[in-house]
Each structure stands twice: as C-alpha cells, then as structure tokens.
C-alpha cells in the first residue's frame, strides 16, 4: 500500500509541477540548454552590430527574430514531451485501479502514443517499473500486457530496451504470486514480444535453460510452446533457425530420458491437470512436441517403445491430451515407424482398450473414473495413426492399407459419439493429405476407397437433420474431394449413393436462421459461428463436385452429378431449391473458367437441365430467380464453347481459316486464357457475355436456338413433366416455358403425339386456370403442323371423353384452318371401319386399334359438332359428315353391339352411351347444330330415329331423312350429291347402300338436275343394278321408276286418286288404313307435282276421319293430311288454307289422344300445317311439340293459334266448339278446357262469336266437367258457367 501511495504522490507532483516533470526527464534538459545559450549570444551580438553599422540594422533584426522563433519552437517541443511523459506516467498508474473497459482504452492510447514517441513511452514504462518496485502483482500483470502491446506496434526496438525488458521478463517469469500461472504467462509474453527484435539473445537463453539437466520451469516451456504455435512472432529469417534450434535441443536432451527424475517430471508435466482440460496450455503442447522430437532422436528402439507405452497408458479422457499423445506418436514415427506401429498394435490389443470398445454403451451414472480414462482411447489411437501418416511422409505409402484398415476397424467398433467421429475424420484427413503430398501418390493404388466412403456416408447419414453445430459434414466432404486425386477412380456404382447422401444431409437442413435459433436452444450451445460453418459446408460441397469433374471431365460425369441435383432443384421447399441451384451455378461457373470439359461426347440430357433452370427462373424467391438466370448464362457459354471446340476439331486440317495466317491454332488448347485463345473463341466469348444481361425468356430462346433436336425434345419433355408437379408455381412456370419453346420450335418437333398425350395426362391435375390455358395453348400451336399425329394420339385417350379431353380437342381446333383439318382427319379415322376381331383371334391386337379409333372418332366428332371452335368447320364439311354418320350407323348395326347390358351383367359404363346411341346422337347433333333443324324436326316428330336402331329398318330411316331434306328444300342437297355419287363406287357395301337410298329420294328434288342430268342419273341407277347387294339393286329399281324419268306417270297417278278416295268409307279398318297409306305413297311419288286440283277433296275427306273411333284410322288420316300439306305448293295454298286452318284445333286437341300413334301424327301434322301457313316462331313450336308437356307448353300452343288474326280466331273457336260433339270424351274435355282458356283471355271476343245454341252446348259440357274429381276443375267450371250465364242473359236482353 505504501508503495502504491508513493506512486500516486509522485505521479501527481509530476503532472502538477513542471519542475518535477523536468527533473524526471533529465534527457529533455540536455536538448534544451544549448538552445538557450544560442539565444542570449545572438541578442548581445545584435546590439553591438547596431551601434557600429546602422546600414545592416534591418538584416540583424530579421536574424534575431529567426533565432528567437527557433528557441520558442524548442521550448514548445520540450513542453510537449514533458506533457506526454506525464500523461503516459499517469495512464500507467491508473491501470492499477481501472476496470477492463478502461484498461482497453488506456492501452489503446498508450499504443497510439508509442507510434509517435516510442522512446518516450519505453523510457516511461521502464522508469515506472524501476521507481515502483512495490506495486501489486495485478498491477504488474496489467503493465506486462500494456508492454506487450506497445512492443508489438514498434517496428524497431532499441538494443537498450531489448536487454532491459528481456531481463524484466526473465525476473518475473519464475516469480510466484497470487495470480499463479497467469502472472508468469504475462511475463513470458513480454519475452515473446522481445523475440521478434532480439531473437538470438532469447534463443541462447532458452537453449541454456532447457539443457541444464534440470527439468525446465513451466514458464520456459510456455515460451517455447507459443513459439511453436505462433511462428508469426518471429521474423521470416528467424523461423528456420528456431526449427533447427528445436531439433538440436531435442537431440541434446536424449540423455535426459535415462534420468529417472527428469523423465518422471516430464511425464507428470504432460499428464497433470490444468486450469481447464478443454484447452491445452502452450507449455503442455510444447512438451508433447518436445517429447516426440526427443524420442525421434533416440536411437534405442527399446527406449522408444517403453516411453510410448508409458505415454499411451495415461488418461485419454481429455481431447487435448489425446491430441498431444497422437502428436508425440506421429513425431516418433518419423524415424521409428515400425516401433510406433508395433506399440499402437500392442495398445489396441490391451485389455483396458478392448474393454473400452465394449463398455461405453452404458449410462453415464454407471461409469467410474477408470472407465472415463479409457473411454476415448480409440480416439487417441485414430489420431495417432493420422499423425503417423502426416509425419512419416515419404515412408508412409507401404503402410497406408494397414493404417486405414485399423482406422476403419476402430471406427466401426468404438463407442459412437462426437469425439470418435471428429477423431476419425481428423485422422483420415491427415492420412489422405499425406498420401496426396507424397511424390509416389500418382502411382499408388488406394485399395480401400470403397470402405472409407462407406464410413463417410454413415457419418453423414447419422448427422441430425435439424441442426448444424459441427463440421463433420464439411470434413467428410473434404475427404471425399481429396480422394478424387487418388487412384483408383471412385467406383461408379458407389458414387450415386454418395451424392444422394451428401445432398440429402446438407440440402435438408433447415434454413440458416432456423439453424442459428436451434443451436441457441441446445442445452450446451456450441461456441461456433453457425453462419460461417454453414457457408463453409456449402463451399465444401461445391469443391467436391468440382473435384469429381476434374477427375473425370466428361459430359457423362456432369450428367451424373446433375441427375442427383434434379430432385432438389424441383423440391417443394424453397431453401432446398435455393441450395441446389447455387450448386449448379457454381459448378457451371467453374467449368466455364477451367474449360476442362471433354468434347469427345455430347452433353447428356442438356434439355432437361435447361428446362429445369428455366422453370426456376420463374421462382418467386428472388435469389433462386437470379441464381438460375446466372446458371443459364454459364450453361450457355459452356454449350457454345463445346460447340466451338467441336467445330475446331473438325477443321483442324485448315487452321488458317480459323486462327488467321499468323495465329497459332494450338493456343486454343491452353487453359482458357482469352489472350491465347483463337479469334473465333474470343468473338464467341464477347457475344456470349450478353446472355447475362438478358431476361429469362430471352435467355431461354437464345439457348433453345442452339440445341439439337434431341436436346430440344428433352427440354420439352421436362417441361411437360413439370405440369404434374404438386407445386402450383412450378406448374405455372413449366406451362409458360413449354409455351415459349413451342412458339419458337413447335413446327420442327417429332413424337408430338406422345407429347400431346402427356399434356393430357397432367391436364386434369392442373388447378391454376392460367397454367391450364397455357398448356392448352401449346396444343393449339402444335396443331399448326402436327394435326395427323395429334389426332391419332388423342383418339387413344378419348374413350370415354371427359371434360379435360374435350377441352384438349377444342384447343386443338382453336384456329380455323386446324379445325377443318382435324375434322378431315377424324373422318378418315371414322371411315376405317374393320369388323372387331373375334375372341379367339390371337392376332387381334393390330386390328383392334383401328376399330376402337373408329368408334372414338365418332364420339369426338359428335362432341366437336357442339364446340364453338368447330362451328364453321362443321358447316364446311357437312356433306362428308352427313354421309359418314349414316355409314357409321350402319357399321354399328353390323357390329350388332348391344344397346343395354344383359340381365345380371354389371354396367360400370352406364353413364357412357353405347356406340349405337352415340352414332345416332352424332347425326342428330349434326343436323341441329348446322341449321338443319327442320330436317331434324321431321324425324323427331315422327319418332323416326328408332328406325336407325335396326339393320332392317335402316333403309326406311335413311329414306325418311332424305325425304325431309327434299321437302324442306335443304340447301346441302347439292353438296351432298357431290360426295354421294363417288360413294356409289365404294368398296364398302354400307356406303353404296347409304348412297343409293339417299339418291332415290333426292330424285324428287329439283336440285338434282343441277348436279346430274336426267340421262346421267339413269346411267348411275342402271349401273347400280349390277351391284352384288340385292338391297342396292332393289333400291335402284325403285329409283328407275321415279316420275322424273316417266313424266306420263303424273296423270296416271292423279287419275287413281278418286278411286282411292271412294274406298275410304269402307267399314274395314285395315282397308281404310291401307288406302290412306296408298294415297300417301301416290302423293310422295308425284313429288313436287302434287295432287293438283284433287288436293282439296283429299283434305276434306281426310279431315273427316280425325275423330274416328279407330286409333289406326285417326293416325293414318292425320299422316295422310300431313303428307298432303307437304305437297301443296304456294299456288295451291289459297284453296287449302281454310282446310288447314280448320284442322289446327282438332290436331291440337288430339295431342291429348290416348293413342300414342295418334299423338305422334297429330304433332307432326300440326307442325307441317304451321310450316305451310308460315307461322312463327317455328323452332319454338317444334321444341314445344317435341319435348314439352306442361302448362307453359299449353299456353304457348294456345297463343300460337289464337293470336294470329280475328278470322283465324273465329275459325279456331268454332272448331273447338265442334269438337265438343266428339265421340271421345277426353277430346270433348280438352275442347272445353281450350274454350274456357280462350274465354278467360278473350271474354269479349268469345261473347260476340257464340250464339245461344253454343252457350247451351258449352253449359252442358261444363256441367259434366264439374263431376271430374281432379282438384281445381270444380272451381274452374263454376267460373265458366257463371260467364256463360251472363252472356246468355245479355243476349236475351
């Protein structure tokens, strides 16, 4: 305390009083005194000169002022030095009472001062130690630290201070204080700081102290340990001398091994416990090195083995101890490799060691101290083998297999923990490094590569997938990279598993932020920078991939590496994709810079790579997007470089064309330096560099332009496969990429059919509308050049035709020229109608496909006839479709396909219509969607479609359809005739049959003569008489009897009509029905000539039978009336109009007839009459008659009749009143209801038109209706009766 008080008093006085400061700095006075003397002398001389020579007065004044200014500067310098010295002294004093933060600040200030005033600071520190010998050890310790810092910033240390501070350090290095080793280490650090400026002196002292024969003090060992571990403390020229000195000291220390006391102290110093067992002090580290060097210099093998055995029998509990023992063994192996190997083998067979291999699966509480001493002995032996390899160097190759086999053995059979794994990796790293550095490594066969790789893969597989707190992954991958430089090359069968293991172990780690959080949550958080470890691990993986490529620089090797990356490039997890794409980018950049890739083989699956990177360019993660785009740029450069090299290799015979007259073509084959490369490559490089400034779409277009067709196809297939991804963003990107490539190269592709099928396969799983639209747009683009292939492919996937497949067909025909071609191709497939193979036919596979495709084509055409995209095309090919549908229906009937499943048979496809019904619906839809609904209406209202369901009624169905077309003056008859005539010469009987059936009906159309002359038509029919089919011959005969060829028949047929009419009133039902049918046939044969003047008579007689009691008669009468109406021309309408109008209400009421045949004929005839009267809306009328039966239908039909004109209103009302006299009760009922409905809507008009007799009839009828039990009828009839009473009362008035 007194010393400290004295120190503070002295320091305070030195600051407060300048005289004290000057007395303390006598060196400064020696510089200041001469300056004062010079100043006084100058003044005296100035006064003398002024009195003697006034002319030089001015010059003397200037000189005097200059002298005075110099004195002032010297005084200022003196004061500044005094002030700095005082400040430095104060800071040295304050260190003893400052906290850590203040000490750091003070140290920083003193270091800054030392750079400007080195001697001042050194002198102040020296004087402080000298003047304050009683300061505390803690204060001294802190001063040592400041002194080390100050010496460290000095470039030159004066010899005086070297000796001074070296002596100061030596005095305190062995001093015992309350701070123990810390104090001694601080003093030793001063000596280490001096080493850089005074190495010879320090080295001499170290050597002297070490070789006294007495075991050296710990502080001396500390200094030597630091010198070994921190060679940068010495100057470059001193480092070599230090190593030589160390070897000499080791050799001179060999005799000490035989000194019992010295040896025991050495072993005790090595094995004693330190402040912490987790860190190894420099003194102990030096002892392991020193021990190894001494044993290395020992020539006696027995002595070496004895000491190694003793060393290995010490504790293996602590990591630094194990490392030190291994280092000693490695150093010994330099000159005693056999002895080191033998001792390790002996140690491995020892009983305690064997127990350590088995016992440590026990729980911690079951382990005693002795167990812990041996628990990690296998770690020591692994490290020892590694050190042996590292230090033996050139002598190690014959021992490598033995060493590695022992390492692998201990790895498998030791207790698994972080210590073992780390020791194994460290040892293997040293072994592989030693082999790699060996001059004979290029010829050495590393025979246990496979076993070593298995160990490394096991290590990585066992690493936890949710944390990254050790460098095990990084070390293992570095070892794999080192193995690439050794022989033999890595087993190709083992490399895929190795790559998968590495990628899975690293890519599946959580994101970096999560890794850092997870590390903080551990029970014992590791003292490691997780971020740095993460990036180092990624760099190790990059280096491994680069080593693989350097080992085998082929396109196939690149494909192998990338094929294992694809799984991660397409991962659903963003961070996994991010890591994978970074690896790709780094690898391509490396290959681009090295230009090491062989040109002997082309790239494998380059299209897949381009597609994958192209999809990743659309990733929502900006890092992935930019990195993928960069990867594309490097890949493009790599691709261009490869193509350029291939071109150069082909043209090497004429190098002047490539390199110029003065260029050396061989310069190209250099390392890739642009200065030495060919002009072609330089131009290519400057052009390719622009790829990095392009957008992703531009880059993809540029790359795709340089791909071969196989590569381009691979790209497209990869994009198509991407449509099936579970990631919606990946699907969208794949669809966009596919569309981009097809837009540019779709016209030159092959295997388009399979591509279309693949797109269809994924179409149903695509949820995003935009992606689905892009995929469908691809089909539209492909259809420009590949319609036949696509149609054939889509036919195979269109049974059954679901909504996705239908959208595919619509996309296929989205553009007008394509839709026409698609229908043409479908028609071609439709007309390939082979009979289905028999069950026993073993060669049926080839025949079955056209059969199925024909049915599929029929289904597709049926659906496409409704599609908006095919509307115009269907109109354009109507004739072909019309004839094809008719022939297809005959074909289906030939197949005798059942329309419904047999009893007891399951019908899993009940929802899917049969081919027969589909073919019929296809014909219906063709007529209805192309504006030919009039023809459709004729068959629908006659229920004539049923005739298409049997091969026997098929001719009748075709005839009725053709007749409807003629009667409706179909505009397509002329076009159909153009395609029909060639069909008469077809090889297929069904086509000839269909054609002749149509032709004999078309003979009644005036349009026929525009296509065929009368004579040509006769010739065609005459030729058909030679047809093998009897049905065709019969039809030809019918056609030859047409009135077109026999005009005289008109009068003959019309002359028969009166006789037929007279026969109508016979009582035999069958005769009457037959006569009506004959009249209808005569009217049909007369064609456009009609019945002429007899039409009115036929109409009157026929209407009489509308209310006949016989169902068949009523039906026949209505059918005949309809046929008559169809033959009435415009010129005859005036005479028939009244008859037609008077028939409308009876026909309407018979829609409720109890006979279905009568109802059908009533509908058809009602429709025909409306057509003749030109009532509108005709289409609505047809739909109502055909399919509607409710109240709305009744209201429409009533409105259709009763709102035309006053004249027609009275006719219809009078006809309804007449129907009240019907023989059929239900007709009377419906007539009454009709009148009642009219009364409700037009009461005034009804009251004006009926008379008393009508009122009585209506009243009687409605009274009878009141008895009807149906709800609502009673109320309805009551209102009607009330109305008629009022009308009757008004008429009486």
Image (spheres, rainbow, N blue to C red):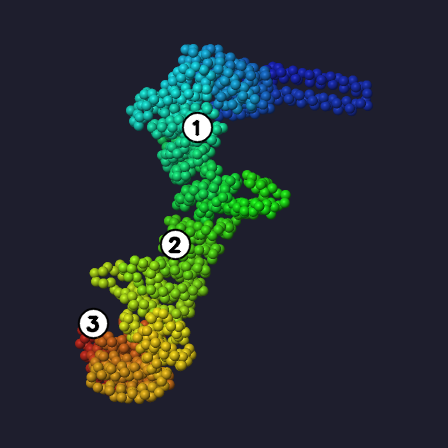
Q: Is residue 690 left or right of residue 400?
A: right
Give the SS element for disc 1: helix
- Between 628 and 1174, the residue placed more toward the observer is 628
Give the SS element for disc 3: loop
Q: Is residue 357 left or right of residue 247?
A: left
Give the SS element for disc 2: helix
- Between 515 and 801, the residue placed more toward the observer is 801
| Marker count (numbered) | 3
Classify mark 3: residues with Cα within 10 Å, few (<14), some (14-19) or many (20+): few
Q: Which residue lies at the image location 25% right of the left edge and 88% below the top edge?
A: 1062
**Where in the figure is residue 157, as x and y percent of width and height?**
58, 19
Residue 758 badge: 2
Residue 862 badge: none
Q: Between tags 1 and 2, which lies in front?
A: 1
Q: Quadrant of residue 37?
A: top right
Task: Give the residue at mark 3.
Answer: 1271
Classify mark 1: residues with Cα within 10 Å, few (<14), some (14-19) or many (20+): many
Q: Which residue lies at the image location 39% right of the left edge and 45% below the top edge?
A: 572
Q: Which comes before the other along the chain, label 2 or label 3?
A: 2
Q: Which comes before the other along the chain, label 1 or label 3?
A: 1
Classify mark 2: residues with Cα within 10 Å, few (<14), some (14-19) or many (20+): some
- Between 262 and 693, the residue placed more toward the observer is 262
Determine the CA span between mark 2 and mark 3.
62 Å
Q: Which comes before the other along the chain, label 1 or label 2?
A: 1
**Where in the figure is residue 99, as x and y percent of width and height?**
47, 23
Task: Give the residue at mark 1.
Answer: 431
Q: Between tags 1 and 3, which lies in front?
A: 1
Quadrant location, the C terminus: bottom left
Viewer can see residue 668: yes
**Where in the figure is residue 1189, as x and y percent of width and height?**
27, 72
Viewer can see residue 325: no
Determine the CA span between mark 1 and mark 2.
53 Å
């Amino acid at each position: 305390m007194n010393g400290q008080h004295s120190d503070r008093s002295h320091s305070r006085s030195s600051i407060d009083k300048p005289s004290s400061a000057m007395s303390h700095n006598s060196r400064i006075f020696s510089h200041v005194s001469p300056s004062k003397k010079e100043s006084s002398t100058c003044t005296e001389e100035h006064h003398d000169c002024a009195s003697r020579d006034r002319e030089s007065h001015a010059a003397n004044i200037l000189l005097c002022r200059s002298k005075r200014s110099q004195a002032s500067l010297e005084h200022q310098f003196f004061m500044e030095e005094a002030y700095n010295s005082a400040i430095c002294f104060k800071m040295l004093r304050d260190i003893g009472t400052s906290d850590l933060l203040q000490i750091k600040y003070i140290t920083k200030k003193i270091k800054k001062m030392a750079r400007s005033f080195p001697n001042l600071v050194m002198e102040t520190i020296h004087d402080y130690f000298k003047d304050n010998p009683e300061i505390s050890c803690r204060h001294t310790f802190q001063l040592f630290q400041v002194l080390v810092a100050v010496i460290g910033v000095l470039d030159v240390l004066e010899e005086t201070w070297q000796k001074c501070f070296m002596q100061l350090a030596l005095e305190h290095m062995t001093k015992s204080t309350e701070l123990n080793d810390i104090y001694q280490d601080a003093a030793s650090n001063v000596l280490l700081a001096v080493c850089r400026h005074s190495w010879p002196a320090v080295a001499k002292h170290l050597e002297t102290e070490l070789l006294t024969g007495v075991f050296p003090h710990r502080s001396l060992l500390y200094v030597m340990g630091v010198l070994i571990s921190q060679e940068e403390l010495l100057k470059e020229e001193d480092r070599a001398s230090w190593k030589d000195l160390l070897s000499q000291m080791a050799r001179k220390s060999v005799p000490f091994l035989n000194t019992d006391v010295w040896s025991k102290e050495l072993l005790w110093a090595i094995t004693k416990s330190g402040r912490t067992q987790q860190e190894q002090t420099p003194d102990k580290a030096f002892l392991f090195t020193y021990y190894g060097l001494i044993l290395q210099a020992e020539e006696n093998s027995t002595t070496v083995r004895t000491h190694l055995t003793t060393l290995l029998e010490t504790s293996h509990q602590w990591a630094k101890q194990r490392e030190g023992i291994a280092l000693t063994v490695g150093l010994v192996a330099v000159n005693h490799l056999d002895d080191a190997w033998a001792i390790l083998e002996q140690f491995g067979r020892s009983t305690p060691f064997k127990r350590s291999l088995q016992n440590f699966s026990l729980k911690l509480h079951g382990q005693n101290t002795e167990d812990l001493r041996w628990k990690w002995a296998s770690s020591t032996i692994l490290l020892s083998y590694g050190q042996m390899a590292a230090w033996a160097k050139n002598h190690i190759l014959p021992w490598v297999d033995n060493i590695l086999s022992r390492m692998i053995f201990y790895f498998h059979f030791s207790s698994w923990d972080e210590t073992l794994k780390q020791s194994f990796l460290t040892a293997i790293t040293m072994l592989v490094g030693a082999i790699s550095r060996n001059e004979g490594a290029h010829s050495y066969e590393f025979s246990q590569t496979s076993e070593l790789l298995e160990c490394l893969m096991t290590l990585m597989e066992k690493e936890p997938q949710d944390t990254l707190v050790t460098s095990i992954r990084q070390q293992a991958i570095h070892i794999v990279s080192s193995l690439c430089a050794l022989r033999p090359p890595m087993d190709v069968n083992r490399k895929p598993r190795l790559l998968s293991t590495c990628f899975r172990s690293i890519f599946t780690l959580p994101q970096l932020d999560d890794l850092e959080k997870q590390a903080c949550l551990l029970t014992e958080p590791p003292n490691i920078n997780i971020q740095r470890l993460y990036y180092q691990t990624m760099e190790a993986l990059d280096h491994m991939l680069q080593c693989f490529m350097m080992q085998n620089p082929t396109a196939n090797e690149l494909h192998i590496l990338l094929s294992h990356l694809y799984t991660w490039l397409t991962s659903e997890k963003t961070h996994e994709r991010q890591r994978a794409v970074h690896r790709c980018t780094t690898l391509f950049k490396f290959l681009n810079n090295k230009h090491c890739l062989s040109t002997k083989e082309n790239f494998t699956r380059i299209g897949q790579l381009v597609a994958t990177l192209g999809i990743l360019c659309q990733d929502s993660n900006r890092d992935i997007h930019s990195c993928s785009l960069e990867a594309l740029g490097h890949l493009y450069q790599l691709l261009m470089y490869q193509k350029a090299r291939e071109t150069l290799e082909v043209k090497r015979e004429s190098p002047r064309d490539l390199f110029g007259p003065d260029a050396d073509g061989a310069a190209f084959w250099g390392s890739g330096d642009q200065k030495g490369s060919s002009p072609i490559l330089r131009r290519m490089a400057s052009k390719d560099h622009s790829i990095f400034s392009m957008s992703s779409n531009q880059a993809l277009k540029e790359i795709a332009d340089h791909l071969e067709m196989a590569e381009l196809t691979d790209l497209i297939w990869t994009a198509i496969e991407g449509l099936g991804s579970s990631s919606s963003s990946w699907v969208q990107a794949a669809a966009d990429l596919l569309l981009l490539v097809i837009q540019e190269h779709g016209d030159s592709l092959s295997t388009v059919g399979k591509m279309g099928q693949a797109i269809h396969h994924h179409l149903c799983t695509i949820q995003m509308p935009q992606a689905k639209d892009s995929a469908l747009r691809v089909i539209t683009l492909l259809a420009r050049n590949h319609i036949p292939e696509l149609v054939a492919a889509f036919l195979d996937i269109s049974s059954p035709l679901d909504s996705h497949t239908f959208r595919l067909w619509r996309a296929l025909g989205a553009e007008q020229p394509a839709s026409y071609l698609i229908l043409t191709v479908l028609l071609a497939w439709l007309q390939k109608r082979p009979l289905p193979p028999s069950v026993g036919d073993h060669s049926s596979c080839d025949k079955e496909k056209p059969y199925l495709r024909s049915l599929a084509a029929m289904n597709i055409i049926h659906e496409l006839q409704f599609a908006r995209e095919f509307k115009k095309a269907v109109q354009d090919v109507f004739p072909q479709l019309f004839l094809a549908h008719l022939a297809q229906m005959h074909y289906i009937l030939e197949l005798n396909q059942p329309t419904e499943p047999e009893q007891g048979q399951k019908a899993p496809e009940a929802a899917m219509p049969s081919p027969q019904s589909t073919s019929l619906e296809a014909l219906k839809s063709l007529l209805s969607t192309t504006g030919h609904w009039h023809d459709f209406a004729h068959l629908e209202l006659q229920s004539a479609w049923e005739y298409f369901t049997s091969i026997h009624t098929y001719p009748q169905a075709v005839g009725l359809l053709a007749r409807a077309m003629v009667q409706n003056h179909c505009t397509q008859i002329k076009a159909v005739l153009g395609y029909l005539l060639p069909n008469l010469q077809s090889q297929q009987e069904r086509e000839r049959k269909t054609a002749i059936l149509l032709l004999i009906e078309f003979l009644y159309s005036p349009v026929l003569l525009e296509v065929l002359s009368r004579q040509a038509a006769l010739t065609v029919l005459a030729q058909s008489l030679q047809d093998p089919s009897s049905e065709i011959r019969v039809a030809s005969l019918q056609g030859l009897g047409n009135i077109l060829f026999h005009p005289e028949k008109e009068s003959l047929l019309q002359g028969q009509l009166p006789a037929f009419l007279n026969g109508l009133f016979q009582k035999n039902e069958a005769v009457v029905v037959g006569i009506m049918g004959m009249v209808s046939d005569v009217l049909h044969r007369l064609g456009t000539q009609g019945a002429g003047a007899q039409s009115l008579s036929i109409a009157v007689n026929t209407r009489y039978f509308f209310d006949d009691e016989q169902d068949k008669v009523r039906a026949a009468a209505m059918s005949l009336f309809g046929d008559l109406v169809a033959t009435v021309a415009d010129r005859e309408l005036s005479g028939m109009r009244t008859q037609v109008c008077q028939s409308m209400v009876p026909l309407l009421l018979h829609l409720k007839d109890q006979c279905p045949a009568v109802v059908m004929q009533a509908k058809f005839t009602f429709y025909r009459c409306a057509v003749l009267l030109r009532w509108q809306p005709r289409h609505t009328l047809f739909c109502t008659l055909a399919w509607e039966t409710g109240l709305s239908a009744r209201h429409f039909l009533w409105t259709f009749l009763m709102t035309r004109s006053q004249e027609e209103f009275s006719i219809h009302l009078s006809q309804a009143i007449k129907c009240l006299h019907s023989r059929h009760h239900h007709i009377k009922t419906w007539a009454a209801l009709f009148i009642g409905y009219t009364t409700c809507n037009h009461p005034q008009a009804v009251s004006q038109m009926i008379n008393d007799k009508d009122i009585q009839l209506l009243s009687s009828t409605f009274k009878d209706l009141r008895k009807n039990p149906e709800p609502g009828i009673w109320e309805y009839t009551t209102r009607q009766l009330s109305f008629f009473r009022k009308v009757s009362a008004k008429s009486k008035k």
